[in-house]
Structure formats: C-alpha cells, structure tokens
Amino acid sequence: MTIAVIHAEKEQRARAHQDQLTKPRGALGRLEDIACWFAARQGKELPDPLQPHIAVFAGDHGVCDEGVSAYPSVVTGEMVKNFARGGAAINVLARQIGATLAVVDVGVMVDLSGIEGIEHNNVRRGTANLLHEAAMGEAECLAAIHTGRRIACEAIAKGANLLIAGDMGIGNTTASACLICRFSGATADAVVGFGTGVDSHGRQLKVDIVSRALARIGNCPDEAVLQQVGGLEIAAMAGFYLQAAEAGVPVVVDGFIAAAAALAARVMEPQVTGWMLASHVSRENGHHIALNALGLSPMIDFGMRLGEGSGAALIVPLLQSAIALHNEMATFASAGVTDKDE
Ligand SMILES: Cc1cc2ncn([C@H]3O[C@H](COP(=O)(O)O)[C@@H](O)[C@H]3O)c2cc1C
Ligand SMILES: O=C(O)c1cccnc1
C-alpha cells in the first residue's frame, strides 16, 4: 500500500475561505492552518467534524531488568486492567472528547486472557532485554505491526476520522530513547529523560544502557532497528500510523513514545509524516529532538510526561474548534461587514 494523496488544491480553497471570514486575515493564527490542514487531508474545503478513536497499546520491556524505571513491570498489566475499567487518565479524556477507546495487549508480561474490555493480541510476554539481544524476533515485530494496522482499519471502518495511539509499557522510555537517538543522530545524553521519575543517578544509568544498546546494534540497517531496540507496543503504534496514512486518516502523535513509533513508521514509509500532527512537547528530555526530526511542531507545552495518548486527546478540542470556526463563521459578504480592501 502507498500513503494517501494530500489535496493541495483543497488546502488553497480552504485558505481562500479563511480569508473571507469575519476576522482580520490570519487572526486565528494556527487554528486557521489546522482547519486548512484537515481540508487538504479530508479532500473537502469544509472538513467534517472529528470523530476520534484512541487505541492504547500495551507491552512490557525486558530492559527493566537493568532498573531503568521508577516502577516495576507488573504496573503495565495492572494499568491495562485500569484502562479496561475506565479509571486511567486516558479514559477520562476519551470520555470528555467523545472518543472511542480500544485497549490492546500486544506484549504484556502477565496473562490478561479472559479479561473483558481488552483486545487480546499478545505476541510475546514482554520483549527480551535490548541491552544484550534483539528485543523481539522479526516475525514478532511484524505481528505487532500487523495488530496496530488491524486496530486502525477497524476504527476507520466504524467511522473514525482522527486516530490517536497511546502507549503503556513500563521501561518504554528507554526503548524509545534508543529509537530516537538512532533515527535523529542525537546523543543518548541529549535524548534520555527521567521517564516515570528516576533520579539523576537513574537517568545516568539509562544513558549508559541506551549508549551500549546503540553500540550493540552498530550500523544494522534502519529497518531492523525497531526489532532490535523497540517494543511490541511501539511496533503496533508504528503499524497503526502507517495504516492511517495509507487510508487517508490523520493522526495526532502523542508524547515521547509516540514520537519514537512515528520515527520507526517513517523508516518504513517516509511519506507517513504528512498525516501527522503533534499535540504537545513532553517533559521527557529528547522529545523536541524527535519532533524536529519528524518535522512536526507541537501545539502546547503543559509539562506533561504521561503517555497513554493523553496529550493527543487533550488537544482534540482545539482541533474541533479550528474546524467549527472554519465551517460556521459568517463571511464578510454574508454578514455585511466591510472588508479592509473595500
Ligand atoms: C501508574 C503509571 C501509569 C502510566 N501511564 C503511562 N505511563 C508511562 O510511563 C511508562 C514509561 O516510563 P518508564 O520508562 O520510566 O517506565 C510507560 O508505561 C508510559 O506509558 C505510566 C506509568 C505509570 C507508573
Ligand atoms: O512523553 C511521554 O509519552 C512519556 C514520558 C514519560 C513517561 N511516559 C511517557
């Protein structure tokens, strides 16, 4: 499959429409750009209102054996149960914006089978330790990517026109830092952050582990990096982004882990970033580096460092406002307001 076409002429028509609305030209700033961005992607001068779908992908990380997180791996499975019961931050935000939510076990360590409210797609019970060996096998990585693709397909078939991928996986800021370093060329020290809240000694340990993992994979081909140092949930997120872009459905890229997944998706299909908006800049150190590498500029800086898709969900009302203003405002002509050139 190839990435869907972006309709430049609809963007121009939308831009011309914006200039007719009863406001000084450009006065709605980035809201105007966002409305035109959706016009180009939906192929409609007046974009449809947004129907968001959020999928939270969960997986565990063998690298937790090195002590890279402030929390133990069991929290991943416990949080998945919390998502299924509706008690996590992303559940609250999903309800608030009227988004449907899927919770997907791609690689959680504990057995979650039989629990309702979870999509059961466990590829393996957590990755291997990326410091010493490939995090997953090639077939496992492909299976995780395929799961992400399938979840995106199903949401689009049910009418979603905006997709958000969230992550849950204790240890995944370490895996994500490896991906961001490798794909941006930045150093481990610039990219590694405090994750769930390790201290400065813990961060230094993460820097060391990321540096050694990058040295281990050396100059292995870019296509193999996700399998070597990624995560099952990160691979699923990459597949989710690829499927959305192929189907012509925009995505909002969340924080640090989502940016790492987006970079991995870009290795498989460089045009995928044309379908991405970035919600926020995460507190995690190298997130701005990853966004720069993706060519995306974040909308807000709220000091967030949660993941789960929370930052992406938070900015959906801004996107909805951008589209509503574009579609519903009167024009100078219809309202009888004198334009500056008249
Ligand atoms: C209770 C809890 C809920 C979370 N929701 C997202 N994360 C976030 O923190 C984890 C990554 O940080 P690190 O690499 O330091 O482990 C991921 O699970 C991410 O989704 C959470 C973490 C915790 C503890
Ligand atoms: O930005 C994120 O997505 C993030 C940062 C720290 C921990 N978990 C997620």
Image (cartoon, grey):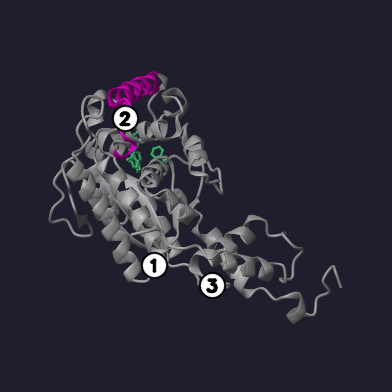
215 with respect to 112 (left or right): right
Circle 3: residue type: Lys
Which residue is drawn at the image coordinates 59% and 67% (left, top)? Answer: 9
Occupied quadrant, residue 211: top left
Q: Which residue is mark 2?
A: 69
* Distance of label 3 from label 1 (alpha carbons): 16 Å
Q: Which residue is mark 1?
A: 160
Q: Secondary structure at mark 1?
A: loop
Q: Is residue 211 magenta?
A: yes
Q: Nearer the viewer, mark 2 or mark 1?
A: 1
Indicate the position of residue 134 as horizontal and vertical percent values: 22, 32
Tell me how many marks there are. Answer: 3
* Distance of label 3 from label 2 (alpha carbons): 45 Å
From which residue to which does the magenta span run?
201-223
Is residue 286 in view from this perspective? yes
Which residue is drawn at the image coordinates 31% and 21% (left, top)? Answer: 212
Most common SS among magenta residues:
helix
Q: Earlier in the sequence, mark 3 or mark 1?
A: 3
Is the distance from the Cβ of mark 2 to the nearest ligand 1 atom less than 8 Å? yes
154 with respect to 160 (left or right): left
Circle 2: residue type: Ser
Q: Is residue 206 magenta?
A: yes
